């Protein structure tokens, strides 16, 4: 029975995860379990009888047989692992006859302890960093839990009460100051930003936000955004000044970027527009003079920019001159420049002309049909001789400029009326690009509408999704006398009066609303030209009313030149009051 018990004891010790080793009083090993055999990678018969230091040179097992004191919970490194061991003397009849060691690997436990220590250190660092950030913040910050106990506060908030954060953290918020508002966020569950209240007798602008964890409100956060309402007004003034500067630089940047406009940026996939773009791409690579014809607002200037951008002159300057916008007596000096003293009021040192400014690049002469007969003769000479003479100077200056002209007038009719030189017409009409009006490419309307909505969403900071079906019907029925520019102005006007994410009929100019009501009754009895004229006349009247009679502003709203507006006023018999 005793033998069986001993066998059971050996079996138990061999199956334990702990390593067990016993030595006699001389340090010779008298017992090892299988865990030790596996550790030493040797069978027991090659271990037993050998001195313990043959396998464990630094063992403290011999020490316990000298002083008789057990060594418990000692750490040691074995085979690149961490172990914990208990060493105990074996005493028989009051005499030490040997010692036993039990050791167990704790490498994973030690790694976990090290990680926890590192994590705790990081948590402490993050806590200190958060406290530092909160104290550096110009805002006052305070947080409470569901029991209205202050759990967090920074120095700027505590300063309202001439206290430190440590003096108010842990107290009920009502103990710190009476009638606090921000904890109400816990009851409403709704954040509130920028409300005006008082804090310890001082008017402030603050925000309150519920703190939500796992879908439950566990507290509230309050922030003092402005310690004084006057600070807000000062900031608003500063923002307005910055916005003015930003608008200026934005305009300058857009002015520069316009010269980098390519054909791919001209919106529209209709066959008629694609045909014109394909021709223009081929023409862009040459130096030939180009005449762009099309109604006002069709995008003639965009094509001129794209011709320059995709030409071999793209790195050179692009200079635009609106021949209708410059008074006739100043157009010559504008185009060709002048010498000092050339005329009364001439700038000291003279001025370089647009043709010279465009040297090595492209000059775009817009509204060339409005140029006087005298100026046409001087322009013809420049095109033929490829040189200019400044006013007051007899010295010709060679220029290397590509000329692109544009007009919304029928030059052949003007030639018949002796209002445009036939020789100049043939000089500028080397290649003609006829830009189709919007009413002839209504298939492009969806792309154009999306483009302008995206543009004005960015400009106005809104999120408009599109137009209503009623507006879509009006757009497809309208004949767009102002073309793409009119469409852009209509959508921009809608953005100024919008009250939702979709452009509705009520957001359109009155002339479009009126035309949409009348068109169904009259379109079977009136020809297309009359409909176009009527719509154009109503558009002019609407623009004049919107501009308070200011002709310059009305022309801008309509997307035409002031000279063009005066001609249409005369044509439709609208009095120029």
Image: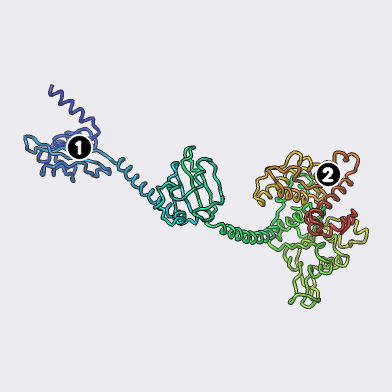
Point out the residue furthest to the bottom here. 341
Element at badge 2? helix
Using the image as rendered, state which of residue 208 and residue 3 is in the foreground: 208
Q: Quadrant of the N terminus?
A: top left
Using the image as rendered, state which of residue 218 and residue 382 is in the foreground: 218
Please rate how many residues cluster around mark 1, counting C-alpha atoms within 10 Å: few if below 14, some from 14 to 19, many from 20: some
Please rate how many residues cluster around mark 2, counting C-alpha atoms within 10 Å: few if below 14, some from 14 to 19, many from 20: some
- Coordinates of residue 61 in the picture (x, y in percent): 15, 42
Q: What label sits on residue 102 in the rendered view?
A: 1
Residue 475 appears in the picture as rendered: yes
In the rendered view, would you say 93 is above or below 121?
Answer: above
Residue 135 appears in the picture as rendered: no
Q: Is residue 545 left or right of residue 499?
A: right
- Coordinates of residue 16 in the picture (x, y in percent): 23, 31
Q: Which residue is mark 2?
A: 515
Q: Quadrant of the C terminus?
A: bottom right
């Amino acid at each position: 029975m005793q033998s069986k018990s001993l066998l059971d004891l050996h079996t138990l010790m061999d199956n334990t995860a702990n390593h067990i080793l016993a030595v006699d009083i001389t340090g010779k090993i008298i017992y090892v379990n299988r865990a030790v055999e596996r550790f030493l990678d040797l069978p027991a018969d090659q271990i037993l009888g050998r001195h313990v230091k043959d396998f464990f040179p630094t063992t403290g097992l011999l020490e316990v047989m000298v002083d008789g004191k057990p060594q418990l919970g000692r750490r040691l490194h074995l085979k690149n692992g961490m172990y914990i061991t208990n060493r105990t003397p074996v005493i028989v009849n009051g005499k030490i006859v040997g010692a036993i060691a039990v050791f167990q690997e704790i490498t994973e436990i030690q790694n976990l302890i090290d990680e926890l220590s590192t994590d705790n250190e990081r948590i402490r660092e993050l806590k200190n960093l958060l406290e530092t950030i909160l104290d550096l913040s110009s805002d006052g910050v305070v947080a409470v839990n569901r029991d209205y106990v202050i759990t967090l506060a920074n120095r700027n908030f505590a300063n309202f009460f001439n206290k430190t954060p440590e003096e108010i953290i842990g107290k009920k918020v009502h103990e710190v100051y009476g009638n606090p508002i921000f904890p109400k966020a816990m009851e409403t569950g709704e954040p509130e930003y920028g409300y005006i209240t008082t804090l310890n007798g001082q008017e402030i602008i603050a925000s309150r936000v519920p703190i939500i964890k796992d879908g439950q409100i566990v507290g509230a956060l309050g922030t003092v955004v402005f310690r004084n309402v006057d600070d807000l007004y000062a900031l608003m003034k500063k923002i307005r000044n910055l916005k003015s500067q930003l608008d200026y630089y934005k305009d300058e940047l857009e002015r520069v970027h316009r010269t980098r406009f390519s054909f791919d940026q001209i919106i529209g996939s209709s066959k008629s527009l694609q045909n014109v773009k394909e021709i223009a791409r081929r023409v862009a690579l040459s130096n030939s003079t180009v005449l762009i014809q099309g109604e006002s607002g069709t995008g003639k200037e965009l094509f001129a920019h794209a011709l320059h951008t995709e030409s071999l002159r793209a790195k050179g300057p692009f200079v635009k001159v609106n021949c209708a916008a410059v008074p006739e007596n100043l157009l010559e000096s504008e185009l060709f420049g002048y010498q000092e003293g050339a005329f009364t009021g001439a700038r000291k040192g003279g001025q370089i002309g647009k043709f010279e400014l465009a040297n090595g690049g492209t000059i775009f002469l817009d509204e060339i049909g409005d140029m006087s007969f005298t100026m046409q003769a001087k322009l013809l000479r420049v095109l033929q001789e490829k040189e200019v003479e400044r006013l007051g100077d007899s010295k010709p200056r060679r220029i290397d400029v590509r000329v692109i002209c544009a007009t919304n007038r029928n030059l052949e009719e003007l030639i018949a009326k002796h209002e445009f030189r036939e020789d100049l017409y043939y000089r500028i009409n080397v290649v003609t690009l006829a830009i189709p009006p919007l009413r002839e490419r209504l298939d492009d309307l969806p792309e154009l509408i999306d483009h302008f909505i995206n543009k004005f969403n960015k400009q106005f900071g809104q999120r408009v999704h599109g137009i209503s079906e009623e507006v879509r019907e009006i757009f497809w029925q309208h004949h767009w006398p102002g073309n793409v520019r009119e469409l852009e102005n209509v959508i921009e006007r809608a953005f100024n009066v919008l009250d939702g994410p979709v452009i509705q009929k009520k957001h359109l100019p009155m002339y479009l609303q009126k035309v949409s009501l009348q068109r169904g009754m009259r379109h079977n009895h009136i020809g297309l030209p009359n409909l176009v004229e009527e719509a154009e006349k109503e558009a002019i009247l609407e623009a004049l009313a919107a501009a308070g009679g200011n002709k310059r502003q009305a022309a801008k709203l309509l997307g035409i030149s002031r000279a063009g507006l005066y001609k249409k006023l005369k044509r439709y018999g609208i009095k120029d009051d």
